Amino acid sequence: MKFQYLGTAAAEGMPAVFCNCEVCATARERGGKNFRTRSQSIINDELLMDFPPDSMMHFHMHGIRGDKIKYIVFTHSHSDHYYATDLLRHGGCYAHNMAEETLGIVCSEQLWERMQKDLAGAKKDVILEYHVAKPFESMTLGEYELIPFPARHSGDSEGKLALFYALKYQGKTILYAHDTGFFFEEVFDYIKEKGLYFDMVSLDCTNAHLLSKPTGSHMGLNHNAEVLEKLREMGAVDEKTVCYVNHFSHNGNPLHDELSESAAKIGFNVSYDGLTLEI
Ligand SMILES: [Zn+2]
Ligand SMILES: [Zn+2]
Ligand SMILES: [Zn+2]
């Protein structure tokens, strides 16, 4: 499976929109992998994980044809993951000769409800096919199988459900866990009980060098190491598993080179915008 990180920052981006802290100032000087846009990934050029406000720019920069997107899998409604305004452009006078007229949407019932309101004006032009995502209920989308997990996250301003996912495709499985704090025990139990094995793991690392709290809604390297250790103990990952940390904020001081050094010590690589992997 082809996996590509398109955006690897938290909500404020990096350097952050209006910030001139030392991290952001240094990121501006160094550029390259230190420029991070809002959270998004794409699988096989057709399945998006989340749809932030930087989506169109991601398509432009990486040669992605938006009309070929078959599915968007949403984790939650925070603004770095959900941008309804550009979903309104999927159809009508905004999109012609589309390879895929119907856009498959995977999300919680709460987010689907909100999407209905946000897209109310474009109902006849934008053709969405809804696939309800419920924690621990495996679902099939064409050649993909998805397992939604409950995230330890504030969900959105109304405190609604946030999810993260395991995704299987042609015998390979990835665990894409953004945004979430340390996994709930039920998540570890499910992975163990089902004997899941991950070829790739991508974990929330918003707090990076700062220590994340056990009940916090994001992780730092301390909890990334702990999650990986628990997965290793139950055989869900091994030395062949490709491990990445992702979703960064300037508040955790993670300039790419320095973070790569500390992440390597606990067995992780560091994502960057545009990175493509063959899993
Ligand atoms: Zn986020
Ligand atoms: Zn800053
Ligand atoms: Zn969030």
Image: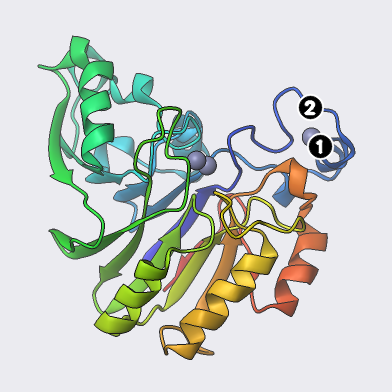
Q: Which mark is residue 129?
A: none
> Is 258 situated above or below 23?
below
In x, y percent, where is residue 70?
A: 22, 45
In x, y percent, where is residue 62?
A: 49, 45
Judge whether residue 241 can be spotted in this image.
no
In x, y percent, where is residue 270?
A: 65, 63
Q: CA distance from mark 2 to mark 1?
A: 7 Å
| Identity of the residue drawn at 30% across and 65% down | 167
> Is 9 situated above or below 226?
above
Q: Identify residue for label 1.
A: 24
Q: Identify residue for label 2.
A: 19
Cβ(mark 2) to ligand 2 < 8 Å?
A: yes
Cβ(mark 1) to ligand 2 < 8 Å?
A: yes
Q: Give the quarter of the image for residue 212.
A: bottom right
Of the two numbered discs 2 and 1 on the same chain, state the one appearing first in sequence: 2
| Identity of the residue drawn at 56% across and 58% down | 275
